[in-house]
Amino acid sequence: MLVSTSHRHDGEQSSAALDLRFMAESTNSLARASSSYLRSAMHQPVEWHEWSADAFDKAQRENKPVLLDVGAVWCHWCHVMDRESYENPEIAGLINENYVAVKVDRDERPDVDSRYQAAVQAISGQGGWPLTAFLTPDGRPFYGGTYFPPEDNHGRPGFKRVLQTLASAYREKPSEVVESAEHVMTAIDQAESFAGRSGDISAGLVDAMVKSAVQSFDAHHGGFGSAPKFPHPSILDLLIDYCGRTGDKQALNVVTTTLDRMALGGVYDQLAGGFHRYSVDERWVVPHFEKMSYDNSELLKNYVHAFQLTGNEFYAHVARDIIRWMDEWLSDRERGGFYASQDADIDLHDDGDYFTWSLAESREVLSPQELEAATFRYDIGEVGEMHHRPEKNVLHVRATAEQIATRMKLEAAEVEELLSSAKKKMLAARLRRPTPYVDKTVYVNWNALCISAYLAAAAALDSPEVEHFALRSLDRLLSEGWSSENGLKHVIAYSDSSAQHRDVGGLLDDYAFTVVACLDAYEATTDLSYYKFAAQIADKMIQNFYDETGGGFFDTSRQAMHGNLGALSARRKPLQDSPTPAGNPAAAIALLRLHSYSAEEKHWEIAESTLETFAGIAGHFGIFGATYGIAVNLYSRPHTQVVVIGKDESARQLYRAALSPYNIAKSVLVFDPDHVVDRNLPPALAQTISNLPGIKAEQSLALVCSGFACQPPVTSVAELMKVLARSMEETQRAAPLQRAKG
């Protein structure tokens, strides 16, 4: 495990400590890797290779199978297997003698991970990290699993036995190994090919997804299904939009119960803010403690949109608290950009110790009255929830300030002061603990998600500083990660700035998410350069990823297919959210939103073709297909743009009113009346607005434009709300599908 001693310089100190620790020891080839996860294994006695043609060439020259390990710097069980097996000289000897060992960072190479995940799931019925796969010398998988203990244990075969058995099988029964590999490759090819699954796009699919969410909803604890519980941001956004359109109380209860319970649970960091990756129990109390940028960006959107829908200030508070944590821990405040993740632990004997509290630890830092309030609030007792250290408590909200006030015979305001003081003292004490590692790698896809989330929050919460950082981050992404000639990169900066930088080509979701982020930035600023970037990146996405024959988008570019190794030869069209929005519906969303400004038939037709490609199968994914449902919503409803023209307080009030209620198919733009028809309008909007008289009137006004036509200007909030309500009703009555095209 990597560990930091400073809460603001964690990455640099961790890397330096790692290099000092092993400077005197021999290192393998991973010492030259860019990835923090790979570099953390450079001291291991295993002769590791990065994913490369050289590694597979060596396997074929020596006629050895390949041992593939896929993991991540934030993955607890990856570090466990590293320590138990890959740092074990005996096991390392078995590997070096019989295999060519390849280690992959799943964050750096999600294309490799996704294919071998499909392979291992076909072989064992399980997936996850660490992913352990055994491949033929040309990269075809014939066996695999996840975590293997070093010796047989708890019904799991020991890694030593697995290594010996498979090495013997490869030597003695090579034809059977090759036959098994061929079957697995067929399973990979079929996993997300979706051939023959096209159909007509049905608006009823969204209703079916809502029904699926309601049926799997845990009415007692919120969320979907039972333990372990993951957040599902895309289905929550789909439900929030559905509630706004229909007023459905049942769907609203799913949203509010889930968001409430998550924010009050241990899966939320009650001291610093931000969400952990998932909960191991159904009550959202005990999390896996790693924190991912993409979880927090997508949940930030959920809480912002729920605030817009309900007006509940609690959701605004949680949104601001997520931003507080991301600003402090996952943000490059000097250059812009968002870091990837924060680890869960500091060593293998640790399981969230940094984030959890014993009663004795609480007593050390709090006054008696603060302690009494905090123990009631956060359920801190002599016996907590952590099995490895039973005295450790996961902080979660058990009692309200009013309930605590009654018990302590105080006023609620006094309790709030005690709790605020206690939180500050506990957080300050926590910062003095050894700090889990922050991976400062800047990934394009996750950064685009964070930028979009920050822009949504900035608008809804009226926070210019949040918008400013989002735009700085997008500017960095575009300047360092994009070129019109080569397209997008997947990584623009690694955690260890001294490491050799390795260029990884952009994947489909890098492109789709960045197009959306650029459109979000255009709507926030009305700076046409962001729209132009969106159009250019979308064109490159179509050129490099779109399947003109079969429809839909491949996850890797055409250029990347040349000379692909192993399972990368399998073409994949991602449809299922896992857990970030899936690439194909995200690409359709990007193109539909772009079309609302460009009116280019190409954008509409490719989005339509993409949705048709998966229409016959998308409904089978239930809540895991929610991004496809969001894309269908955008396709089936006329896009609505509220254009506010003015620069006084009246214009500001019109803008604030237009933002609510939340509507996934609505955007709000503010123009300076002196420049509205100059250089700030994309083609379709320019043509629409230029046909209207009186848009340069001295009085601030708002235009509600839908389906490339605008209604007469209004000048008051009351008039605007009436027009928006009427527009919503007309949208509901609109003939399903095709009307959005205009």
Image (cartoon, helix red, strand yellow):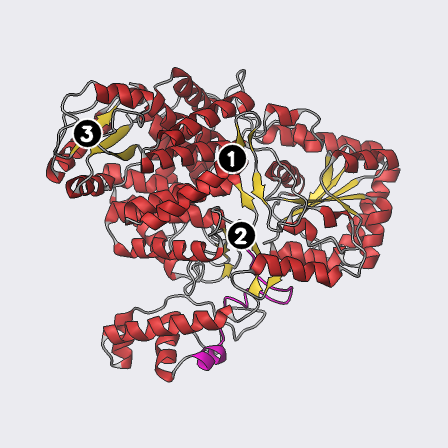
Determine which of the numbered discs, if any, sits on residue 696 in the image. none
**Quadrant of the rendering where the N terminus is positioned:** bottom right
Residue 79, compared with residue 615, is above or below; it is below
User: Which badge, 1 or 3, is on the more N-terminal residue?
Assistant: 1
Q: CA distance from mark 3 to mark 2?
A: 42 Å
The residue positioned 24% from the left and 23% from the top of the image is 734
Q: Is residue 553 left or right of residue 734?
A: right
The residue carrying pointer 3 sits among few (fewer than 14), some (14 to 19) or many (20 or more) residues within 10 Å by Cα, namely many
Residue 351 painted magenta: yes
Residue ID for mark 3: 703
Can you give x and y, in whole percent of width and height, for residue 700 in the image?
15, 35
The quarter in which the C terminus is drawn is top left
Q: Which residue is mark 1?
A: 510
Mark before the other along the chain sequence, 1 or 2: 2
Q: Distance from label 1 to label 2 (Cα)?
A: 17 Å
Residue picked out by circle 2: 341
Residue at the (28%, 48%) spot, across then down: 462
| Residue at the image point whose x is 39% and y is 23% from the top | 201
In what element is the residue under mark 2?
Answer: strand
Residue furthest to the bottom: 368
Amino acid of disc 1: Asp
Q: In the image, which residues are magenta?
A: 341-365
Q: Earlier in the sequence, mark 3 or mark 2?
A: 2
Of badges 3 and 2, the one in the foreground is: 3
**Left or right: where 58 falls relative to 658:** right
- Are the residues flagged by discs 1 and 2 in contact, CB closer than 8 Å? no
Q: Is residue 292 above or below residue 687?
A: below
Secondary element type, mark 1 = helix
**How many numbered marks have been drawn onto this rendered protein structure?**
3
